[in-house]
Image (cartoon, rainbow, N blue to C red):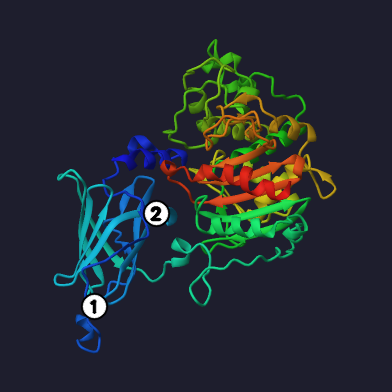
């Protein structure tokens, strides 16, 4: 089924061991809101005993027994049903991955057959779900059948009144009449070292601004959950969607890599006898026996720019940091060091291991001491596996704290009267060192774009007026954009994990063609 590849990509990008995962059943689909004239008859409660009245309105969650389980997580379908007695039946739905929104679930037809209390839902091209509603037990029991007759899966739902429907399906609170009308509010000044101002001190075309926010609310650029803008050192826009707010940590996925780069810059400043041009194995002399003629050529710069040439392997049994390093550098090379770029999570984990070697602290402890405390970042979460920090994607931050990271980099590592990250490191780590593709260049764990890069969302290759920018980029639509010549920072968090629809990368043209022009 077409979604198998996309789910596997999601699992791979979240460091889940693919070799142990069975193929996702045909049930895994995308959901979209769908209206259909149903074969439904809801009998008024005044005419029958309450226990006989069938109403399927409400939120239904897959039962734990029939949820789709993997060794490293669970995928849970959710459906929201509503309808009038003799009107249209409306169904929305989504999937949660370990309680976190993953994607929508698309139906192409829906009906309720009241004579047998059966809900019938069509999905994909040939898929169909049939479930019998038992209101006495509060359960829908059914079977999902794909195009292949042998492809059937049991799928039961129970009512769930604990899930916040807003978090799943409502991007912005509607007004009293049910319509959505966005109103701008200047960001609140909090005790977090960020100064605030009105966006209209900098944006003169208020109509263009409001039209853009309306398009964002309508999900024209994917499922944004936060959008923050800093202009001229001031937070001028802070908006949250789908029930999020500033007090909720958000997993930033591979934006973590860019923060590891900042930490490494601080580390090398503290240990001046080390530099990016020295052989990588110098940091791990205990593994000299693993050197080969080609591996001797690997430098720290190769690891920073993901040109080390290592074959990527995520299926490690990790027990401690040293064990992780040994397994990573034992991987064979598939290209000559420095020859070509290949995105590799293990490169970032090796950078974390260098920090651990030089500082005798894992990166989360080191970050707290030398970076986060100085920026006023007091709360964060950094995932570990068997006690080993996930340096490539495990950090959770508040969006306002992501904005502080962007502001620190914009200001050349300087913050509140103190040089936290060496200016030289900011300069060299955010400049392009290698071409990732026609669309991006790559620095030291930072991405880079300018007008010389192609725009995949355009048909023509004509030269653009695009501003140079560097950015931290995380799977699912997590971004810290820095447009230095405009003194501009943008932060976005999202849950666009289905790579098949391309929504995560729609944030790039959103910034380049819609937000940046507001400030030109």
Residue 498 position within the rendered picture, expressed as x and y whole percent measured from the top left: 42, 45
Give the SS element for disc 1. loop
Label 2: few (<14), some (14–19) or many (≥20) C-alpha neighbours in 10 Å: many
Distance between mark 2 and mark 1 Cα atoms: 28 Å
Residue that mark 1 sits on: 42
Residue that mark 2 sits on: 104
Q: Is residue 357 above or below residue 408?
A: above
Residue 518 position within the rendered picture, expressed as x and y whole percent measured from the top left: 69, 50
Residue 491 position within the rendered picture, expressed as x and y whole percent measured from the top left: 63, 50
- Could you say which is closer to the camera, residue 222 or residue 17? 222
Residue appearing at x 25%, y 55% in the figure: 122
- Could you say which is closer to the camera, residue 155 or residue 79? 79
Tell me, yes or no, if residue 86 can be seen here. yes
Residue 11 position within the rendered picture, expressed as x and y whole percent measured from the top left: 41, 41
Residue appearing at x 55%, y 27% in the figure: 437
Q: In the image, is 125 to the left or to the right of 265?
A: left
Give the SS element for disc 2. strand
Please tell me in which quadrant of the rendered image residue 191 appears: bottom right
């Amino acid at each position: 089924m077409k979604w198998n590849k996309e789910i596997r990509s999601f699992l791979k990008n979240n460091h889940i061991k693919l070799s142990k995962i069975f193929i996702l059943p045909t049930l895994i689909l995308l959901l979209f809101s769908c209206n259909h004239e149903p074969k439904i008859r809801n009998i008024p409660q005044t005419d029958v005993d309450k226990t006989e009245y069938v109403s399927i309105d409400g939120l239904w969650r897959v039962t734990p027994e029939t949820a789709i389980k993997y060794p490293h997580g669970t995928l849970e379908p959710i459906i929201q049903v509503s309808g009038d007695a003799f009107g249209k039946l409306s169904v929305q739905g989504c999937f949660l991955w370990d309680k976190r929104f993953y994607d929508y679930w698309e139906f192409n037809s829906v009906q309720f057959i009241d004579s047998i209390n059966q809900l019938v839902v069509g999905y994909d091209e040939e898929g169909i779900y049939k479930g019998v509603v038992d209101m006495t037990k509060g359960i829908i029991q059914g079977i999902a059948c794909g195009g292949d007759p042998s492809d059937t899966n049991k799928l039961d739902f129970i009512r769930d009144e604990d899930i916040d429907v807003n978090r799943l399906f409502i991007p912005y609170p509607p007004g009293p009449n049910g319509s959505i009308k966005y109103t701008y509010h200047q960001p609140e000044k909090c005790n977090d070292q960020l100064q605030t101002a009105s966006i209209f001190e900098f944006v003169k075309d208020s109509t263009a601004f409001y039209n853009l926010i309306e398009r964002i609310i309508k999900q024209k650029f994917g499922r944004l959950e936060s959008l923050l803008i800093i202009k001229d050192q001031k937070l001028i826009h802070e908006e949250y969607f789908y029930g999020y707010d500033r007090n909720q940590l958000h997993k930033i996925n591979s934006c973590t890599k860019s923060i590891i780069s900042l930490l490494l810059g601080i580390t090398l400043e503290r240990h001046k006898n080390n530099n990016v041009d020295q052989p990588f194995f110098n940091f791990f002399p205990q593994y000299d026996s693993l050197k080969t003629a080609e591996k001797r050529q690997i430098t720290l710069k190769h690891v920073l720019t993901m040109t080390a040439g290592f074959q990527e392997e995520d299926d490690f049994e990790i027990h401690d940091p040293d064990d992780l390093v040994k397994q990573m550098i034992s991987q064979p090379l598939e290209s000559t060091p420095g020859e070509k770029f290949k995105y590799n999570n293990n490169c970032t984990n090796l950078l974390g291991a260098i920090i651990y070697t030089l500082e005798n602290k894992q990166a989360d402890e080191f970050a707290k001491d030398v970076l986060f405390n100085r920026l006023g970042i007091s709360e964060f979460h950094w995932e570990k596996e068997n006690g080993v920090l996930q340096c490539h994607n495990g950090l959770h931050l508040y969006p306002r704290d992501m904005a502080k990271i962007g502001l620190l980099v914009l200001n050349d590592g300087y913050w509140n009267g103190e040089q936290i990250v060496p200016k030289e490191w900011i300069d060299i780590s955010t400049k392009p060192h290698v071409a990732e593709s026609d669309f991006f260049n790559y620095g030291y764990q930072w991405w880079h774009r300018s007008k010389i890069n192609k725009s995949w969302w355009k048909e023509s290759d004509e030269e653009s007026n695009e501003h140079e920018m560097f950015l931290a980029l995380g799977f699912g639509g997590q971004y810290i954009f820095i447009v230095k010549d405009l003194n501009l920072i943008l932060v976005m968090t999202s849950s666009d994990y289905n790579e098949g629809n391309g929504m995560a990368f729609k944030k790039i043209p959103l910034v380049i063609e819609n937000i940046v022009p507001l400030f030109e």
